[in-house]
Amino acid sequence: MSNREVLITPFHNMVLMCPDTTAADVDLHGDLFDEALAQLVS
């Protein structure tokens, strides 16, 4: 995810969001997470 500009803490896999996070940022995370899951199950 960090290679795709989404920061996730390495130990807890928590997504860190700040007040400046936009709906587009959340959507990007969701899309990238879906892609990662698809790669894991293929």
Image: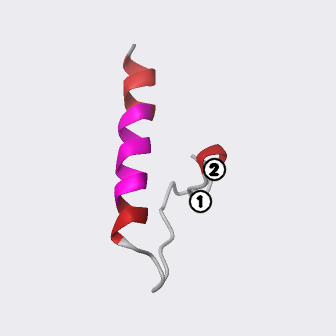
**Structural crowding at the residue carrying mark 2, measured as other residues with C-alpha within 10 Å and reported as few (<14), some (14–19) or many (≥20):** few
Give coordinates of residue 24: x percent, y percent. Answer: 38, 64
Colouring of the image:
secondary structure
Whole-Å distance between the Cαs marked 2 and 1?
5 Å
**Total count of labels:** 2
Counting residues from the start of the chain, the first of labels 2 and 1 encountered is 2
Which label was assigned to residue 38? none
Which residue is rendered at x = 34% and y = 57% of the image? 27
Give coordinates of residue 6: x percent, y percent. Answer: 56, 56
Q: Pick the residue in front: 32 or 16.
A: 32
Q: Pick the residue in front: 9 or 21.
A: 21
Kindly state the secondary structure of the residue where label 2 is placed.
Answer: helix
Q: Residue furthest top?
A: 42
Contact? badges 2 and 1 (CB < 8 Å) = yes
Relative to 29, is 2 on the left or the right?
right
Which residue is rendered at x = 35% and y = 37% of the image? 34
- Amino acid type assigned to the residue bearing label 2 in the image: Ser
Which residue is rendered at x = 66% and y = 44% of the image? 3
28 magenta-colored: yes
- The part of the chain drawn in magenta is 27-35
Q: Main secondary structure of the magenta part?
A: helix
Question: Label 2: which residue?
Answer: 2
Relative to 27, is 4 on the left or the right?
right
Give coordinates of residue 17: x percent, y percent. Answer: 47, 74
Which residue is rendered at x = 42% and y = 53% of the image? 29
Q: Quadrant of residue 9?
A: bottom right
Q: Pick the residue in front: 21 or 12.
A: 21
- Amino acid type assigned to the residue bearing label 1 in the image: Leu
Question: Label 1: which residue?
Answer: 7
- Position of residue 29 relative to residue 15, above or below, is above
40 magenta-colored: no
- Position of residue 15 relative to residue 11, above or below, is below
